[in-house]
Amino acid sequence: MDREGRDHDGDLMAAGEPDFDFDFVVVGSGAAGMTAALTAALRGLRTVVLEKTEFFGGSTARSGGGVWVPGNAVLSRCGVTDTAEQASRYLGHVAGEDTPATLRAAFLEHGPEMLDLVLANTPVDFTWVPNYADYYPEAPGGRAGGRSVEPKLLDASVLGADVTSLRPRYLPAPAGITVTQANYRWMSLGTSHPRAITTTARVTGRMIVSRLRHRQLLSMGQSLAAGLRAGLTKAGVPVWLSTPMTGLEISGGRVTGVRAMRDGQPIVIRAARGVLLATGGFERNAEMRHRYQRAPIGTEWTVGSPGNTGDGIEYGAAAGGALTLMDDAWWGPSIPLPGGPVFCLAERSLPGSIFVNAAGERFMNEAAPYVDAVHAMYERHTDDNPHIPCWMIADQRYRNRYVFTGVPPRKPLPRRWYSSGAVVRAGSLAELAGQIGVSADGLAKTVDGFNEFARTGKDADFGRGDSAYDRYYGDPSCKPNPNLAALAEPPFYAIKIVPGDLGTKGGLRTDERARVVRDDGSVIPGLYAAGNTSALVMGRSYAGPGATIGPAMTFGYLAALDAVSGG
Ligand SMILES: Cc1cc2nc3c(=O)[nH]c(=O)nc-3n(C[C@H](O)[C@H](O)[C@H](O)COP(=O)(O)OP(=O)(O)OC[C@H]3O[C@@H](n4cnc5c(N)ncnc54)[C@H](O)[C@@H]3O)c2cc1C
């Protein structure tokens, strides 16, 4: 069968012996793929992982490494009390409209056992991220204290020589600096809170010690990817880098193998028990983005991994797999800086900043979950009143207190940010508005109103600071509302905001065993999909920190179990 979906019975494999013979072929070396391969190998399947690029880890290695799996052993160990009933109610509430209940139930039932397997068979350990709230903590079953775990620091020596093939993290950092998610929350507060200062001191101390000991510590997604990779080595699973899948082999209606390029040669690999497509999303494929997603869209605003060009989705669809949610993504407001986009996280929740459209008006709770924030940008965007880009407006007090995309408080922002037009600075709001083409009257009125909200502590327009999630990235020393402060101290800053993403979320439709299904719901034998190659269990929503990686790992695990059981 080729990319256009034609079934070549009597194909390469039928014509002769395949070049390689495995039970389970996993395509893609991210969280979904590596978890699946580990599971399959531990259950006795001869397994191989193919990775298109020269690095393993995909977006997973670039990521924060957060894992949202309610009811797992790490949460219990950390004293988080939760019940299956609460988690189910919550997921049903936030994702219910767009996902079948069977998928949600499978995720919640098997997620904890998947994490047990990873804990028992890899060097990576996890810990609860204290109070990193669910994204809708006030929804039924939601948890303000959070259900997210993150990988603990991991010594890169577990990888041996493979350390050079670990996909680099998304933002470069000084050598030896390893920041966990929990550290980031406090460090973003700069010098405005005692905990920020102690956390920064601790992270700096850790950097000095690890440099002196010539140790490389990994955190977040790099720790997760390295831990899974080390587990694969121990389980005897080969990971073939620079080996792109170039097609599926189908015989008698069943997916029987994969075609790929290895060392510049076409090869055929038999997969006796099945093929898992775990090639990530299509965030780096401009043609697919234009075909499926709303304008304006391209590939320049994503922070997803360079190899994620939708290959698994296209090959799976050509084999008859149904596609769903293709217009959506793990969106997030992002700053188009000259070196590449920066995903805006704590920056937009901290007090002393607002987002405005071309009319100079606020149009959302700036601290809202990031998928919702970009949905708001697209939904309100019109030719008459553009919301793409929109602008984050902040004052000098904000710059004096907080870290801004890695730049310490008070330190001037890099000149190239200004020359690129991503950041603009002016002595007055009116001047700033003129420079960015935003209504000066509108902006003045908006800031007056917002400054009054800051004084009273209540955002009467959008409720910023009402949710425990908003407050997680707020400044606890800012009273009466940790997310609200007046914009009053010149100079003022305008930062360009575009609809970025962590990756796309639409893809192949799968069942509760991660089997790819056709439009009529029938299963394509031998074909599985997980992670961002599949349309995940979150529907259009994002339940909490780690809600892409948690399901990716769980459905990878379930695919492997199904292949083990004979498919
Ligand atoms: C900066 C950043 C922070 C994030 N933080 C979090 C977080 O904390 N928690 C969370 O849940 N999510 C987070 N995300 C999102 C999350 O990383 C992804 O949704 C998730 O890792 C996707 O996993 P995956 O296994 O589907 O794909 P990936 O990890 O992207 O792996 C896919 C792999 O497949 C390979 N591939 C593609 N095509 C082929 C082919 N033809 N043949 C062989 N290989 C191929 C790719 O090169 C890639 O290595 C973050 C993302 C980013 C970028």
Image (cartoon, rainbow, N blue to C red):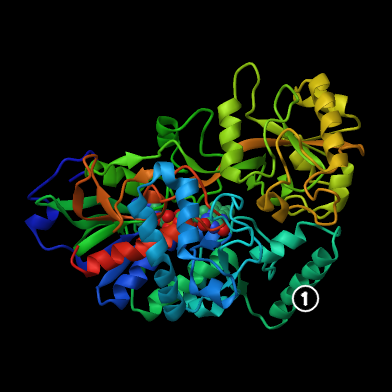
- Neighbours of disc 1 within 10 Å: few (<14), some (14-19), many (20+): few
User: Secondary structure under badge 1?
Assistant: helix
Q: Residue furthest top?
A: 384
The residue depicted at 62 percent of the width and 29 percent of the height is 388
Classify 301 as above or below 251.
Answer: above
Kindly indicate the quadrant of the structure image that contains residue 16. bottom left
Classify 155 as above or below 375.
Answer: below
Q: Is residue 343 left or right of residue 284?
A: right
Label 1 CB-ligand 1 distance < 8 A: no
Q: Amino acid at mark 1?
A: Gly
The residue depicted at 13 percent of the width and 54 percent of the height is 12
Quadrant location, the C terminus: bottom left
- Residue under label 1, please give it: 205
Where does the image place residue 206, in percent across and percent down from the top left? 73, 76
Residue 242 seen by the camera:
no
Where does the image place residue 286, in percent across and percent down from the top left? 45, 36
Q: Is residue 235 left or right of residue 414?
A: left
What number of labels is visible?
1
Residue 507 seen by the camera:
yes
> Looking at this view, is 143 or 257 the one in front?
143
Classify 301 as above or below 400.
Answer: above
Kindly indicate the quadrant of the structure image that contains residue 234. bottom left
Where does the image place residue 211, in percent across and percent down from the top left? 70, 77
The residue depicted at 33 percent of the width and 74 percent of the height is 237
Where does the image place residue 235, in percent across and percent down from the top left? 35, 79
Q: Is residue 276 left or right of residue 98?
A: left
The residue depicted at 42 percent of the width and 79 percent of the height is 121
> Looking at this view, is 409 or 183 the one in front?
183
Kindly indicate the quadrant of the structure image that contains residue 127. bottom right
